[in-house]
Image (cartoon, rainbow, N blue to C red):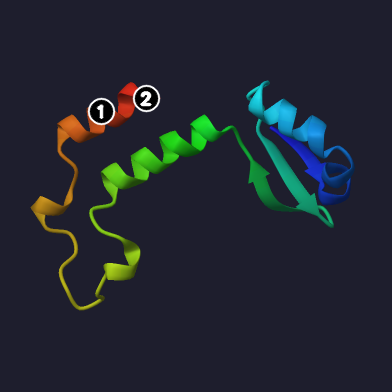
């Protein structure tokens, strides 16, 4: 995975977008030498989103600290996991 400073990314924005969108490259943008964000192909975000939905039984904002959140009905079914794996 390539690293690119935010200053370089700004000056090479069109090239950066093309590298990610068409070259399927992942690029970490840094500021003052520290990783800040990642630019990744949209397909990878869609896969990540599908995996998160399959394994996360409820939105984090709905979580209540005093309720049992890990009952057997909360986990994804094997068929749901298999459906996500088809997209990987």
Secondary structure of the residue carrying numbered label 1:
helix
Query: Could you classify mark 1 by the number of other residues whose Cα lies within 10 Å: few (under 14), some (14-19), or many (20 or more)?
Result: few
Q: Are marks 1 and 2 in contact (CB under 8 Å)?
A: yes
The x and y percentages for residue 69 are 19, 64
Work out which quarter of the rendered image holds the C terminus and state it: top left
Left or right placement of residue 79 versus residue 35 in this view: left
Q: Quadrant of residue 28?
A: top right
Above or below, 15 relative to 75 = above
Residue 87 is labelled as: 2
The x and y percentages for residue 53 are 31, 46
Left or right placement of residue 4 versus residue 64 in this view: right
* Residue shown at the point (31%, 31%) measured from the top left: 84
Q: Which residue is mark 1?
A: 83
* Residue shown at the point (26%, 76%) measured from the top left: 65
* Residue shown at the point (19%, 43%) measured from the top left: 76
Q: Residue furthest bottom?
A: 66
């Amino acid at each position: 995975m390539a690293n690119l400073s935010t200053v370089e990314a700004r000056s090479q924005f069109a090239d950066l977008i093309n590298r990610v969108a068409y070259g399927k490259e992942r690029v970490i943008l840094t500021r003052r030498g520290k990783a800040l964000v990642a630019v990744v192909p949209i397909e990878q975000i869609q896969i990540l989103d599908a995996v998160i939905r399959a394994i996360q039984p409820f939105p984090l904002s709905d979580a209540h600290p005093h309720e049992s959140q890990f009952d057997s009905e909360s986990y994804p079914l094997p068929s749901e996991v298999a459906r996500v794996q088809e997209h990987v």
